[in-house]
């Protein structure tokens, strides 16, 4: 473990600094991608397939090209056929889901482009489609991609110990099948891109969470030009949630602009965002837990089947993370996860907040309640007895001694850098009033109330190569240059606080320059809740290196042996003479640039964040309606860099997942393969009146590895939500829910099946 | 076929404008694409989310849901102009203090709606504040911050 940072006296980290550029956002001055205009800019629109699986025989754009204002049409014939991602080409003469991109038009107005889309004639040869992953795995099923529908040709298997031996020791074995349905992430801002060519150089403004790590290499492949000739910029992001990239949008916009000879902007409609974006995959999780007589888990086994849709994108990681709860939440020597990612002719899945963790945790945490109930143990007590502790899992370390430990832990014998799960359970229980909890289904009547608990663990932010660059100009201007994007979570604010802390400056003194390949060092993708932990440490080190150089120069200027930096001034050892940071900067003779790159993580400890959530619900046993009365989220994310932003991020995460838990679902017509509800209204987005204010608690100590003690925060609070609600419903109404979302229909069906309906 | 055109005269942020538009262009299209007023966002284009809210004759409406032709002769105020008014400052301050926006894409719409609701109901209860904002969607779900901010702006405005 690296030496703990000296966090005895922090002045900026840990304070509620106001969110960067929030005034500009509130007053409409922030320019998002679709707000940008370039001289001579055309509007691009996309023609999408009505078929879930079809060969494109012919595209005739001649009529479209004759329409007023139309400058170019891009068809599969114009697109290079080399893959831009593992299974994705820019445009192919084959479509694999209803809504897939077929052609694009550039015209002077969006309306003219729309008209032109209607004038394009496409001859399709429909092919048999497969819309269900089980059917897709059956012999003889239509192939979505050559080589079979099981992505990678085999399931992902990760294990610790020997589950067969574990089950052999078990006094009882509990099992269940748990389903989670597909839904759309629906960031408020839809995907957009604006491409402008100058000769053979491209500038692309785009909604992006990885201008360096994803867009630029993808564009270089798709356009067949070197990455150095491509500049990608994301001016501001209207929500990411781990989603937003991974599509062809950038490449297609650039190709269209090249063909039209003018800048082109493409902005997805809400419907296109759902169809052509990347959705949350549906999963079926079969879980078995073997326990001793007293309930101690001795074997945990999960088999997951994920509907990846037509393209895998980040689905591999989603599949991997679906096993995280089974593999690591409870102390158990034997655990095995087998995850199948399966292609179907549905709109493509991708990454979304929490990856698979909330899906798998749902199964684990509901089955844990069922075990506790069967053994007559209070579910909170059950968790307090068996949750994974700071010691980690039993067993022997497998990772080589000096290698960084994986951020998705499997092996035993490795401790956590910090783990406040127990405090989260105890303090959260106190806050919700757990002592009020009655036995499951004990309350009579039509509307019944109950309490539920669920835990979660999630990677703490390690596992990314991160880089930061700090510029101190002779004028004294301090700027932090970072390749990643503030997708809306507030990373610009938090990372500036970290730099400010190291430089003993107020946070406002640090400018942030982000997400522009021409002005920033390579940055990792804004994903996996890694920003504060990984880039935060790079920022801290770059700033400390700058501080060191300032101190040295100040000592020279003051003619003393050494100087210290305090509250933005450089002070001689005897404290008698001092210089302002600007004076020393002016004395440097050139801009001072410090850089730090590091591979975030630890070779001795696993870094994870933890949470325990408590819900109080009311269930109407006549109509299956669930009302959330109270929700307490207790989080261990180490030191909280900015309590104001953090509280909003946790509350937003919980509310977002309460909506998904109760309502959000994408419906596909099983005959045509067409998505039926690609809109805010029909996808049932959460509104401000739907849930009570979330009670957010931050527990735990500063983490010894993270910068100033911080660990991941963006995703961990979504992980326990489904199970917290399901367990509260079980306590209220005495029925177990095994399928998300918990719509009134599903609750009613469960009440009926389990004999708890009030007619 | 050349689409029909129409002339629309209206006031936007205090400036009289005469524009030559296609009849199918919405007020939002005109504001964003012709006048470069992009504070009103396009998030659904069908009246479901409130991101495109503007004031027309002082009342909040979804600009994606009216045609430019329907606001002939009317007075349109967008967030860009509202932001400069003295009575908006407590709202701005409260939005920042309560961190009422995360990605910020829905935020101009909420801020404009907050202004309109406090004009109409200066003493709105906390529950009424939430119900008045029900037509606005925030996918970051910054709802707790939003509700707290509007309540704080109400308290700051009313000389209690
Ligand atoms: S964009 Fe107008 S209501 Fe959504
Ligand atoms: S702040 Fe992101 S949608 Fe509201």
Image (tube, coloured by chain):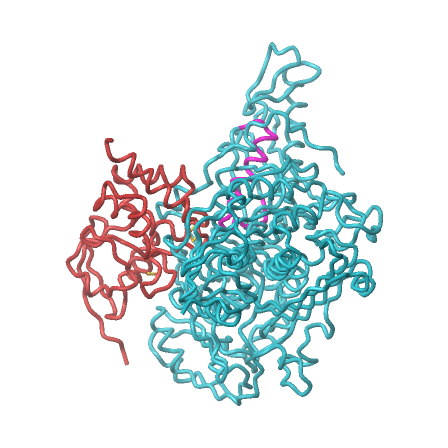
Depth check, front residue: A39 or A513: A513
A161 in relation to A404, above or below = below
The part of the image, by quadrant, that contains residue A622 is bottom left
Residue B131 is left or right of residue A423, and the answer is left
Report the front residue among A93 and B86.
Answer: B86
Residue A325 drawn at (x, y percent): 66, 56
Quadrant the N terminus of chain A occupies = top right
The residue nearer to you, when weighing A66 against A11, is A11
Q: Residue at x 67, y 83 (%)?
A: A138
Q: Do we see residue A270 in this rendering?
A: no
Q: Residue A168 at what x, y percent from top left?
A: 81, 64
Q: Quadrant of residue A188?
A: bottom left
Residue placed most toward the observer, B13 or B49: B49
> Which chain does the cyan colour mark?
A
Q: Residue at x 73, y 75 (%)?
A: A153
Whether residue A672 can be seen here: yes
Q: x%, y% of residue A600?
A: 70, 45
Left/right placement of residue B130 relative to residue A224 reads left
Q: Which residues are magenta?
A: A482-505
Could you tell me which quadrant the C terminus of chain A lies in?
bottom left
- Compared with A202, A612 (above or below) is above
Callout count: 0
Which shade is chain B?
A: red
Find residue A229 and report its horizontal and vertical position in percent: 59, 59
Q: Residue furthest left?
A: B73
Tell whether A570 sits left or right of B128: right
Whether residue A186 is in magenta: the answer is no
Asked if residue A23 is positioned above or below residue A565 in the image, the reply reads below
């Amino acid at each position: 473990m690296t030496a703990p940072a000296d966090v005895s006296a922090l002045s900026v980290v840990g304070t509620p600094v106001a969110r960067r550029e929030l005034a500009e956002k509130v007053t409409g001055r922030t320019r998002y991608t679709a707000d940008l205009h370039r001289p001579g800019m055309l509007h691009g629109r996309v023609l999408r397939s009505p078929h879930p699986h079809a060969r494109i025989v012919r595209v005739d754009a001649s009529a479209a090209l004759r329409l007023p204002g139309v400058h170019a049409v891009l068809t599969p014939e114009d697109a290079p056929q080399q893959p831009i991602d593992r299974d994705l080409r820019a445009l192919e003469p084959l479509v694999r889901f209803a809504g897939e991109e077929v052609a694009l038009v550039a015209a002077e107005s969006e309306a003219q482009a729309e008209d032109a889309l209607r004038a394009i004639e496409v001859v399709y040869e429909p092919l048999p489609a497969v819309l269900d992953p089980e059917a897709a795995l059956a012999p003889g099923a239509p192939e979505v991609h050559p080589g079979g529908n099981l992505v990678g040709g085999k399931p992902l298997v990760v294990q610790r110990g020997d589950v067969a031996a574990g089950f052999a020791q078990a006094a009882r074995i509990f099992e269940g099948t748990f389903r989670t349905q597909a839904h759309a992430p629906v960031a408020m801002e839809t995907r957009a891109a604006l491409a402008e060519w100058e000769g053979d150089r491209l500038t692309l403004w785009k909604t992006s969470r990885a201008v360096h790590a994803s867009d630029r290499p993808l564009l270089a492949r798709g356009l067949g030009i070197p990455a150095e000739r491509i500049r990608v910029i994301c001016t501001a992001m209207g929500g990411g949630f781990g989603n937003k990239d991974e599509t062809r949008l950038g490449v297609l916009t650039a190709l269209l602009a090249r063909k039209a000879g003018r800048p082109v902007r493409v902005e997805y409609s809400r419907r296109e965002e759902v169809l052509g974006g990347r959705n949350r995959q549906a999963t079926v999780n079969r879980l078995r837990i073997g326990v001793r007589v007293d309930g101690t888990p001795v074997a945990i086994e999960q088999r997951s089947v994920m509907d990846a849709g037509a393209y895998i994108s980040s689905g591999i990681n989603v599949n991997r993370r679906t096993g995280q709860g089974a593999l690591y939440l409870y102390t158990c020597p034997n655990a095995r996860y087998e995850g199948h990612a399966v292609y179907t002719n549905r709109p493509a899945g991708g990454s979304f907040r929490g990856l698979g963790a909330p899906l798998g945790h749902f199964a684990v945490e509901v089955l844990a309640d069922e075990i506790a109930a069967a053994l007559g143990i209070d579910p909170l007590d059950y968790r307090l007895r068996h949750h994974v502790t700071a010691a980690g899992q039993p067993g022997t370390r497998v990772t080589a001694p000096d290698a960084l430990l994986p951020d998705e832990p499997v092996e035993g014998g490795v401790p956590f850098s910090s783990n406040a799960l127990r405090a989260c359970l105890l303090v959260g229980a106190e806050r919700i009033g757990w002592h009020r909890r009655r036995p499951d289904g004990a309350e009579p009547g039509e509307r019944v109330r109950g309490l539920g608990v669920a835990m979660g663990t999630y990677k703490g932010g390690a596992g990314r190569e991160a880089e930061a660059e700090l510029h101190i100009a002779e004028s004294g201007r301090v700027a932090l240059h970072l390749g990643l994007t503030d997708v809306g979570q507030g990373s610009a604010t938090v990372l500036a606080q970290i730099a400010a802390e190291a430089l003993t400056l107020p946070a406002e003194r640090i400018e942030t320059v982000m997400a522009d390949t021409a002005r920033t060092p390579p940055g990792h993708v804004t994903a996996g809740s890694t920003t504060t932990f990984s880039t935060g440490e790079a920022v801290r080190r770059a700033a400390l290196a700058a501080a060191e150089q300032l101190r040295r120069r100040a000592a020279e200027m003051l003619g003393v042996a050494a100087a210290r930096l305090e509250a933005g001034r450089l002070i001689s050892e005897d404290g008698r003479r001092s210089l302002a940071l600007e004076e020393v900067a002016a004395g440097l003779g050139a801009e001072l640039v410090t850089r730090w790159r590091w591979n975030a993580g630890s070779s001795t400890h696993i870094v994870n964040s933890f949470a325990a959530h408590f819900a109080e619900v009311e269930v109407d046993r006549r109509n299956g309606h669930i009302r959330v009365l109270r929700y307490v989220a207790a989080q261990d994310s180490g030191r909280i860099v900015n309590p104001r932003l953090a509280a909003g991020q946790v509350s937003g995460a919980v509310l977002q997942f309460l909506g998904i838990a109760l309502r959000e679902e994408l419906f596909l017509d099983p005959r045509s393969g067409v998505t039926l509800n690609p809109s805010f209204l029909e996808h049932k987005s959460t509104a401000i009146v739907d849930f009570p204010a979330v009670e957010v608690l931050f527990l735990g100590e500063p983490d010894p590895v993270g910068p100033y003690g911080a660990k991941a925060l963006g995703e961990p609070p979504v992980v326990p939500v489904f199970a917290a609600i399901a367990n509260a419903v079980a306590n209220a109404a005495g029925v177990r829910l095994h399928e998300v979302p918990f719509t009134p229909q599903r609750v009613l069906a469960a009440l009926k099946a389990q004999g708890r309906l009030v007619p | 076929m050349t689409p029909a055109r129409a002339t629309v005269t209206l006031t936007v942020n205090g400036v009289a404008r005469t524009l030559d538009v296609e009849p199918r262009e919405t007020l939002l299209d005109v504001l964003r694409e012709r006048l470069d007023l992009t504070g009103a966002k396009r998030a659904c284009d069908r009246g479901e989310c409130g991101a495109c809210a503007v004031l027309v004759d002082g009342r909040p409406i979804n600009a994606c849901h009216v045609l430019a032709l329907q606001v002939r002769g009317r007075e349109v105020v967008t967030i860009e102009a509202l932001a400069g008014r003295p009575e908006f400052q407590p709202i701005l301050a409260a939005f920042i203090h309560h961190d009422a926006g995360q990605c910020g894409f829905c935020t101009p719409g909420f801020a404009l709606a907050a202004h309109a609701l406090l004009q109409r109901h200066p003493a709105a209860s906390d529950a009424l504040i939430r119900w008045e904002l029900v037509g606005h969607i925030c996918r970051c779900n910054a709802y707790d911050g939003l509700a707290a901010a509007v309540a704080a702006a109400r308290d700051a405005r009313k000389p209690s």
